[in-house]
Image (cartoon, rainbow, N blue to C red):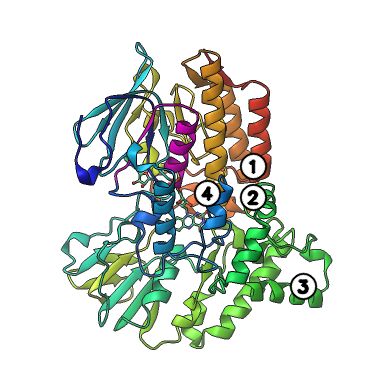
Amino acid sequence: MTTSTNTGAALPTTCDVLIVGAGFGGLYMLHKLRQLGFDAHVIEAAAGVGGTWYWNRYPGARCDIESIQYSYSFDDELQQEWNWSERYAAQPEILAYAEHVADRFGLRSGITFSTRVTATTYDAARNLWMIDTDRGAQVNARFCIAAVGCLSTPQVPSWPGVENFAGEIYHPGAWPHEGVDLRGKRVAVIGTGSSGIQIISAIADEVEHLTVFQRTPTFAFPAHNRPLSPEDLAAAKARYSEIREAARRAPQGRAFATEGRPLLGDTPDQRDEVLRRYWAMGGLDFTKAYDDISSVLEADAVAADFVRDRISEVVQDPAKREVLLPRGHPISAKRPCLEINYFASFNRPNVEIVDVRANPIVEVTATGIRTTAATHDVDVIIVATGYDAMTGTLLRLGVVGRDGVALTEAWAAGPRTYLGVLVDGFPNFFIVAGPGSPSVFSNVILAIEQHVDWISDLLTFARSAEADLVEADPAAAQEWTAHVTDIGERTFLSLGNSWYRGANIPGKPQVVMPYVGGTHVYRDKCDAVAAAGYPGVSIS
Ligand code: FAD
């Protein structure tokens, strides 16, 4: 047993349920299981709670689902007492919220920090998970719950020569806690997804020179972020239960505005009026303005033209504009981003854009980055190239199930789950907000809550039946996974090289990983399975 002040609670040698990760998933899982009388414990690699919001301390980091919705709904007092300061909270505020939740519900006493799980092995003879850590200690638990996050393993491409770079290199997901002084420096940002866009906007005016390396131009909508007034907060809180219910019944776990009709049924003037109105509102609702923008190519083409027109109005330099205009895939083939002065940043003379699709990066040298067209000398490289999404962290947990089969083997062709929660061949092992569930294709906090509640109900059901073994049936897992893939491949996600389908990782199986059939549909399916006594799950 190991105890020290900076590692939080002592690591137990045994517990009923061992949870890995103290982000929003692990925190609520711990709270819920404790309420139900389970002996649960959390192991967390970081020195604090918050997960994503603990690690991603980069300049400009903020959520892109409105804070009123991107927050826990499980406790009305919590949502009534917490005051978000902005429409889209920045990272320090979201981290403060996670810390508040941990303190308010007394969760820290059940979390061991600064400890990484290095192996998770099922012992069939004892029906126990043996969880090994990088501090040498082992925990034996009947149940193991992976709340390790979908965007928690930074992905850094292996450019030749990167080890020779004499300057500093940072990934947004491992940003130094003390911050990075970029003033007066020549900085490269590689990648223009959500994090890249946020960083570029935040640092453009303080660096001496900013070179942005872009592979795929981004469909980004204005966030129109603003402070939330006391009146805004009071109005939202007065109808919080209504907002949450709408979010639970929505396809992506958040309440949204929509005209509720197809774009293709409107005249060009009507379309223009509607799209301008949603553009002016800001936020992700732009793609929801009409029913068919994310599902019919002709409708997407109209909306995409509209976006390009707006970007063209902002970016003055024709050469930069040409590189920045998003083309080649439907808007919803990738995760749309929100921007705050992103496109306007390129009107600054110190901000340059390099098209690495036309001129790929050849190598990193001691002084900078060489593409097939030019060499760019820089002091700092920010590698905003994303994450080994959805499966990356799970596969690094060292999970070994029945008959010594590793999760890496079981998932060699892509993740296979039942309802995204259970994995056949891995008894008593559960995943929170992972592949095969809505997860990152929705408001993740509400997706987490639904999973935590469902897993808790299942464990309670098993306990009442005096059962200690819960395992997905292989046929059920196969059928569910085929269904997830089938739905995914019929959406626009199949038309873009996104991280949703593993396209950013060389050699990763290319399958749409989240369940994209709608969080409300998914929720109903899970509820029906529970109500029917868990068909597809062996409980003994
Ligand atoms: P995480 O927050 O990733 O927490 C997982 C934890 O597990 C981490 O703390 C990690 O250290 C720990 N861990 C992993 N492996 C181990 C191990 N082997 N041993 C011990 N500990 C381990 N989602 C939205 O819905 N809306 C948004 O606006 C939004 N914005 C985002 C912005 C950024 C920059 C990023 C990266 C993600 C964003 N997300 C957003 C997704 C976000 O990840 C989820 O919303 C949510 O925070 C995930 O919570 P989690 O608990 O599932 O995982």
Who comes first in sequence, dot 4 or dot 1? Answer: 4
Kindly indicate whether the residue at mark 1 contacts the one at mark 4 (C-beta within 8 angstroms): no
Who comes first in sequence, dot 2 or dot 4? Answer: 4
| Disc 4 versus disc 1: nearer the observer | 4
Q: Is residue 39 magenta?
A: yes
Q: Secondary structure at mark 2?
A: loop
| Disc 2 versus disc 4: nearer the observer | 4
Q: Assess disc 2: are there few (<14), some (14-19) or many (≥20) residues with their C-alpha within 10 Å of its C-alpha.
A: some
| 3D distance between C-alphas at marks 4 and 3 | 33 Å
| 3D distance between C-alphas at marks 2 and 1 | 7 Å
Query: Which segment did they paint magenta?
Result: 23-45
- Numbered circle sitting on residue 415: none
On screen, 299 above or below 376? above
> Which residue, given by chain and number where applicable, does mark 3 sit on?
271
Q: Is residue 503 magenta?
A: no
- Numbered circle sitting on residue 491: 2
| 3D distance between C-alphas at marks 2 and 4 | 23 Å
| Disc 2 versus disc 3: nearer the observer | 3
User: Residue 472: x, y in percent?
Assistant: 53, 23
Who comes first in sequence, dot 2 or dot 3? Answer: 3
Q: Assess disc 3: are there few (<14), some (14-19) or many (≥20) residues with their C-alpha within 10 Å of its C-alpha.
A: many
On screen, 349 above or below 516? below
Residue type for callout 4:
Ile
Occupied quadrant, residue 292? bottom right
Kindly indicate whether the residue at mark 1 contacts the one at mark 2 (C-beta within 8 angstroms): yes
Who comes first in sequence, dot 4 or dot 3? Answer: 3
Disc 3 residue: CB within 8 Å of ligand 1: no
- Judging depth in this view, the residue of 491 and 32 nearest the camera is 32
> Which residue, given by chain and number where applicable, does mark 1 sit on?
487
Q: Secondary structure at mark 3?
A: helix
| 3D distance between C-alphas at marks 4 and 1 | 23 Å
